[in-house]
Amino acid sequence: MSTKYVYTFGDGKAEGKADMKNLLGGKGANLAEMNLIGVPVPAGFTITTEVCTDYNKLGKDAVVAMIKEQVEAAVKTTEAAMNAKFDAKDGSFPLLLSVRSGARASMPGMMNTVLNLGMNDETVKIIAEKSGNEKFAYDSYRRFIHMYGDVVMGVEAEEGHHNPFEVVLDELKEAKGYKVDTELTVEDLKVLVEGYKAVIREHAGVDFPTNPWDQLWGSVCAVFDSWNTERAILYRRMENIPSEWGTAVNVQAMVYGNMGDTSATGVCFSRDAATGEDQFNGEYLINAQGEDVVSGVRTPLEITKVGSLRWAERNGTSEEVRQAEFLSMEEAMPELYNELDTIQQKLEDHYSDMQDMEFTIQDGKLWMLQTRSGKRTGAAMVKMAVDMLEQGMIDAKTAILRQEPNKLDELLHPVFEQSAIDAAKELSKGLPASPGAATGQIVFSATAAEDWAAAGKKVILVRRETSPEDLKGMYAAEGILTERGGMTSHAAVVARGMGKCCISSAAGVLVTGTSMTINGVDFKEGDFISLNGTTGKVYEGKVATITPTLDGDFGKLMDLAENNTRMYVRTNADTPADAQTAREFGAKGIGLCRTEHMFFEGDKIWKMREMILAEDLEGRKAALAKLLPVQREDFSGILEAMDGFGVTIRLLDPPLHEFTPNDEASQIEMAEKLGIDVSIVKAKVESLHEFNPMLGHRGCRLGNTYPEITEMQARAIIEAACDLKAKGKDPKPEIMVPLIGTLKEFKMQEDIIRETAAAVFAEKGIKVDFLVGTMIEIPRAALTADAIAEYAEFFSFGTNDLTQMGFGYSRDDAGKFLPIYIEKGILKHDPFQVLDQEGIGQLVRMGCEKGKSTRPDIKLGICGEHGGEPSSVEFCNSVGMDYVSCSPFRVPIARLAAAQANLKQN
Ligand code: ADP
Ligand code: MG
Ligand code: MG
């Protein structure tokens, strides 16, 4: 049997069906399905996506020859179903067609629809005569020439010029003194037809094709060609759509919404796509065709009466005016409305999902032109799934799998009021480093941020880039704006951790000390700006924000996730407040507590600096003794906030120079505090300088050269735990050694920790259970994980460093080339955001397998930024991790992604 290239539909029959999306594209498969379930759809046929692939290989002529016979037969079937004739020469009613693209996934950037195909100087006359509506006939004809010229023949506005078709139309309207298109007379439309033809001749260098078959083949090939336009290729790359998929072509009999006042066209949704409310809604226009509803040429009206009343209220339109000019379809065409209402319900029930539909009414008869699962906001996504579950339409598994985890983000951060953002002036756009909305007064230093915030002001911290010294200021600020840095810059990572809005690498922003210019305009301390960390846009002045509430549906969805997950979710948190937030979002423990962040609060930094500046062991020990109670208090707070759950505390990790005063003023202050000469401070700072600090003296290399630091930290942790236990609490500390590459590095640290713990237990006469484990973040640690696991009780994959060292990309410098790499397709994603499963993933998998080979019950988790990224979470599930850990505001996303991974992999 020869290959089937063409699938027909119409009259309640179809050769395709809904689950043939790969072959027929989304639109084609659903057009077929609607026929099969008794929904009125104009007859037509779909040319398969496989033909598109052939077209790209074999070229136009070969493919046209290949499918010609099947297309001609399908046109005959369509003619019979619609009782009309394509290329009619015998006086029967002419069949006009629409030609529509339709890939598997909906794809903007593909070819626009061509309507009214088949029109020429002869058919227009027959249609005018048979419909008794000459104006309709010529209006359709001029629309067709315009569309065909534009879409198929590529006649469009040249650089700096107006669209040539519109120039002709505008000239005519101006000459006649018309305001709107509907004022055009039949004679005007005839003039336009000739004018448009002349435009094509002039711009395309050939005549507009009058033969309907030429028109059909021209349009079909144009759809195939549009698969490889720049726009389409770019979109595919962004959305990860393979170029092998191809697009289908849908050819369908035209129905006319522009035949007069008993005709209409519209779009509708079976539920509210913005709120999720189970309320049918949409817009329609009487006497209009296709694109008119969306193009904004005329203002469409509401379909339901409820919608119309709501619209009038919002718009301040009186009931009198509403009834006179803005009647809903429900009121204007009650019978057709009822029919549409029944169909929308039928389609929603059939697909068990919210449907986005297009319809046309031709002279009192309703036709459906498209249905698909509708796009929705995060809030609507959650509400619809929970409602449909409760309505018995879907099961729990479907409700969970239908969520896009990242969209939950919208429910977790403050957002701008829509009307306020519409009115705001955009100043710049940068990387959306951490989502949310923030509005406040500009400050240029962490100290100013703290001072102003203490005085009750809302501030935006603006820096060239941030360093750990800015932490306090970042805490105090509403949002952070940096001139430099990528998505994993210090500012970005820390801000995400804090759930604080941040924009990095903002275009046109130049920060110099205590002033800033944006595209040449000056901004001073105290000026108001607003940041949208979700879009990366910076706005002038104050913009009103709202804090979305986590309503009951969100909680119900999280319960569903909880009941369907294998992995659990921890959080990366350094403060009791963050731990508390995460706990409210459902975190079960802390996967990463970075102890160094604790040193920047209040005057702790001075004690830390004293330790660093100490001349010898004695001096260090003296300084450490001062730090001990402070650390103990910090650990006590965090262990208590996560009482009953494991808390992984990482020993000191960053290079010491991050704690030293870098500016002259602080160096002088330091010298005064310690009663030493400032030159000594300067010399120390200089001596700590490293060429590659990220590969330098940090992590366990600190603890192994200065064991007294590890000893102090271990003591602080264990003492805090013992004290809590004495108070009847249930602390579960897990002490984590960072940055090991060899077993010995771990072993030395482990010995100090265990000896210290034993000493504390003896002193206090109380014992607590604790674990000692390590981060796997250096490739060598993954490669030797079996040996390490003989001693380490848990592994936490630090995939930020593992990616940095596995790729050899400096996290702090990758912003210079990663965007280009992604644009050029060298990398699909930023590997610091989406775990590189193919490469770095192998190290993770190996680490897990080797770890389990020597310690079968080893606890495995991830604490890199990837722990909150859905595809990476799925990977973690597949390699058998026990938990993922992420910033507090991503906990719900990770929980959902973990449940999805579990459901998909079972
Ligand atoms: P898109 O993918 O942009 O939605 P469509 O292929 O759905 O493009 O076509 C756009 C519009 O063209 C439809 O909403 C409909 O109004 C109109 N249209 C398409 N096919 C027909 C048809 N057979 N009869 C009447 N109008 C049509
Ligand atoms: Mg459509
Ligand atoms: Mg690390």
Image (cartoon, rainbow, N blue to C red):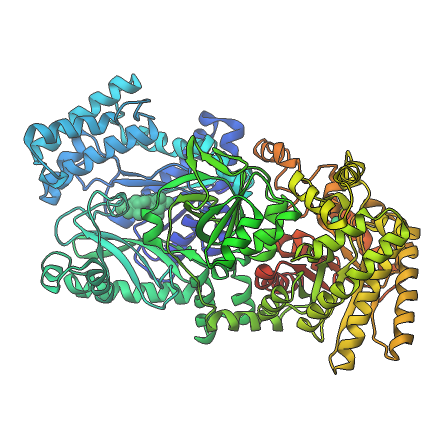
In which image quadrant can residue 75 be found? top left
**Total label count?**
0
Q: Residue at x 58, y 67 (%)?
A: 581
Instruction: Tell me if residue 97 comes above or below residue 775 in the rendering.
Output: above
Instruction: Tell me if residue 541 comes above or below residue 884 in the rendering.
Output: above
Residue 834 visible in the shown view? no
Q: Residue at x 9, y 31 (%)?
A: 188
**In this view of the protein, which residue sits in the foreground, 81 or 658?**
658
Residue 378 at x, y percent in the picture: 46, 59
Position of 751 compared to 598: left or right?
A: right
Residue 703 at x, y percent in the picture: 86, 52
Instruction: Tell me if residue 842 comes above or below residue 325 in the rendering.
Output: above
In which image quadrant can residue 210 be found? top left
Position of 872 compared to 504: left or right?
A: right
Residue 622 at x, y percent in the picture: 84, 57
Position of 261 compared to 800: left or right?
A: left
Residue 157 at x, y percent in the picture: 30, 25
**In this view of the protein, which residue sits in the foreground, 528 or 583?**
528
